[in-house]
Image (spheres, rainbow, N blue to C red):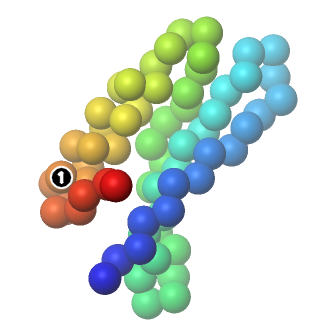
Amino acid sequence: MTNIFLYSKSNKTKYKTYKIYLYFKKYNKYNIIKLGIYNPKLNIISCIYYILLKYLNKYGFKLN
């Protein structure tokens, strides 16, 4: 079974932005996939989640 971790990193800038990462834990190694940057002012979180769901569906994962 593959464990999936979602991690968001906050940057202290004028507009609060988040870098969202996806981690696949395989064989004690982390495979890091950068999904994009979320900016609340621009409201683009749905685009990132769409990319995430599309990526997970491509490789047969389901996000709970």
- Left or right: 20, with 45 as reference point: right
- For label 1, the SS is helix
Q: Which residue is disc 1 drawn over?
A: 57
Instruction: Give how far across and how far down residue 25 sits, in percent.
Output: 46, 76
Residue shown at 52%/74% (left/top)?
30
Which kind of residue does numbered mark 1 sit on? Asn
- Left or right: 48, with 37 as reference point: left
Q: Quadrant of residue 38?
A: top right
Instruction: Give how far across and how far down residue 9 sits, in percent.
Output: 68, 44
Say above or below: 39 vs 29.
above
Residue shown at 46%/26% (left/top)?
45
Residue with the most extreme top position? 41
Residue with the most extreme bottom position? 27
Say above or below: 34 vs 42.
below
Residue shown at 73%/38% (left/top)?
10
**Quadrant containing the C terminus in the rendered view:** bottom left
- Left or right: 39, with 48 as reference point: right
Instruction: Give how far across and how far down residue 15 sits, in percent.
Output: 74, 15
Residue with the most extreme front position? 64
Q: Residues within 10 Å of mark 1 (few under 14, many from 20)?
A: few
Residue shown at 67%/27% (left/top)?
17
**Quadrant containing the N terminus in the rendered view:** bottom left
- Left or right: 34, with 9 as reference point: left
